[in-house]
């Protein structure tokens, strides 16, 4: 049996007719940039996130850097980010001219460890970016307390957390502003690149909305040296169709995760820990084991495709060699990078596939 790491097929089959007729309608309408679909999506997604404002943009990286830029964070400033995340979190900071300052995660949740944040704060620190990694919210109340104490902006990297909850509250509504990605593989994905900023802060929302469109408040009047990072009408239209199904798709992932959590019992394998405050959306189901590469090869030989999220922590990336870190500087991030393995997880996995993955994992010696 072959089990791919991800398949869009069940999801895309369900909405195929709707997507195709929407495409035809838009093809005939000839309105492609900043129109009704983007406006409607922004309203619907802000409602989904329990925030007042949503601004569509080009991708998740842009969403984060637009927020930082709008807060006027840049040269000479520092921003706290987890040492264990996708590189986009750190690159968003670098892009503004500010410096990413890495803080180690908890080994159980893989999210940033709030107890380690304070000692990394300096006079130059302006913001904290908390990442809800794999779809499980970071411990936001603790982080918020620190942000308040030091007067820092608290930004959520919600790129993996569409619909994720923290003590019943939606990811995206937990800090000052949040960036989402709609990369096709995310729980809510476009058919291409797309992203969004959500916030309750009107001033920030207005500024982000202008900066994403050449810094323009009204057409041909430019109040900022902005960028072009707009959400396409057609992607917004597709996202609206998908958003209507998201809760159902997330519920299905939760069912699969429950089966994995109940079924996997190989003592060599560490299963994901769900914190008491979290409602996980299982963007990624990550297990951990020593000798990961051998284990991965065994699964591959049995037809099970896996992915490593992520094999190289930020501080050891060649792109960040200017920060002069070395192996051993962030041992928890390094341990995770060496041991973590993401197993198949997508909407519509069938019981046979789930059972097969569990069985092969449990038979590994
Ligand atoms: C996907 C992702 C991003 C970047 O999103 P893009 O749309 O690819 O730019 C940022 N942060 C995290 C944690 C992500 O997983």
Image (tube, grey):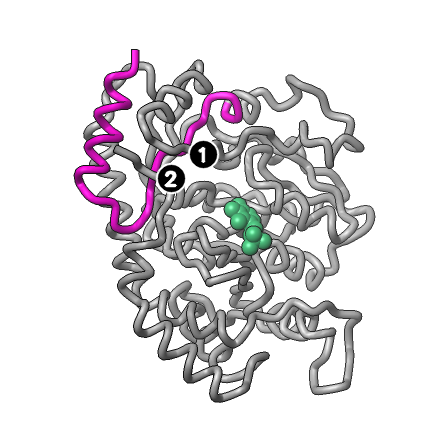
Check mark 1 vs ligand 1: CB closer than 8 Å? yes or no.
no
- Quarter of the view holding residue 260: top left
Give x and y (percent) for residue 155.
57, 53
- Which residue is tagged 2? 5
Could you tell me which quadrant the C terminus lies in? top left
Could you tell me which quadrant the N terminus lies in? top left
Query: Could you tell me which residue is drawn at 36 percent across and 23 percent down?
Result: 301
Q: Does the magenta run of residues contain 342?
A: yes
Q: N-terminal of the two: label 1 or label 2? A: 2
Residue 275 seen in this snapshot: no
Query: In the image shown, does 194 or 131 lie closer to the viewer?
Result: 194
Query: Could you tell me which residue is drawn at 36 percent across and 34 percent down?
Result: 343
Give x and y (percent) for residue 288.
40, 24
Image position of 280 with respect to 238: above or below: above
Do callouts 1 and 2 mark residues in contact (Cβ within 8 Å)?
yes
Query: Could you tell me which residue is drawn at 68 percent across and 31 percent down?
Result: 317
Image position of 133 with respect to 107: above or below: below
- Which residue is tagged 1? 307
Relative placement, left or right, of 236 versus 74 is: left
């Amino acid at each position: 049996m072959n089990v791919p790491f991800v398949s869009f097929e069940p999801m895309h089959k369900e909405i195929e007719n709707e997507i195709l007729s929407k495409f035809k309608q838009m093809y005939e309408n000839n309105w492609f940039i900043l129109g009704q679909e983007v406006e409607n999506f922004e309203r619907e997604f802000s409602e989904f996130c329990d925030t007042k404002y949503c601004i569509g943009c080009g991708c998740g990286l842009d969403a984060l850097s637009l927020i930082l830029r709008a807060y006027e964070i840049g040269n000479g400033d520092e921003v706290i980010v987890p040492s264990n995340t996708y590189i986009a979190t750190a690159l968003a900071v670098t892009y503004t001219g500010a410096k990413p300052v890495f803080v180690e995660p908890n080994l159980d949740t893989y999210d940033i460890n709030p107890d380690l944040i304070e000692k990394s704060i300096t006079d130059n620190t302006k913001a904290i970016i908390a990442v809800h990694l794999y779809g499980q919210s970071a411990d936001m109340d603790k982080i918020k307390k620190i942000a308040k104490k030091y007067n820092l902006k608290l930004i959520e990297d919600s790129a993996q957390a569409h619909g994720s909850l923290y003590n019943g509250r939606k990811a995206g509504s937990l800090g000052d502003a949040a960036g989402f990605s709609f990369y096709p593989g995310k729980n809510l994905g476009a058919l291409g690149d797309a992203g969004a900023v959500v916030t309750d802060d009107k001033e920030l929302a207005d500024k982000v909305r202008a900066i994403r469109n050449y810094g323009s408040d009204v057409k041909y009047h430019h109040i900022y040296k902005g960028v072009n990072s707009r959400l396409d009408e057609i992607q917004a239209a597709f996202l609206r169709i998908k958003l209507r199904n998201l809760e159902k798709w997330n519920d299905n992932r939760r069912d699969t995760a429950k089966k994995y959590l109940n079924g996997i019992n190989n003592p060599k394998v560490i299963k994901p820990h769900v914190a008491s405050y979290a409602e996980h959306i299982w963007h990624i189901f990550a297990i951990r084991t020593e000798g990961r590469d051998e284990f991965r090869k065994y699964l591959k030989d049995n037809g099970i495709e896996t992915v490593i999220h992520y094999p190289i922590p930020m501080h050891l990336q060649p792109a960040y060699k200017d920060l002069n870190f070395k192996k051993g500087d962030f041992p928890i991030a390094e341990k995770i990078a060496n041991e973590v393995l993401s197993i198949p997880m997508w909407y519509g996995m069938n019981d046979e596939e789930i059972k097969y993955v569990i069985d092969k994992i449990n038979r590994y010696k």
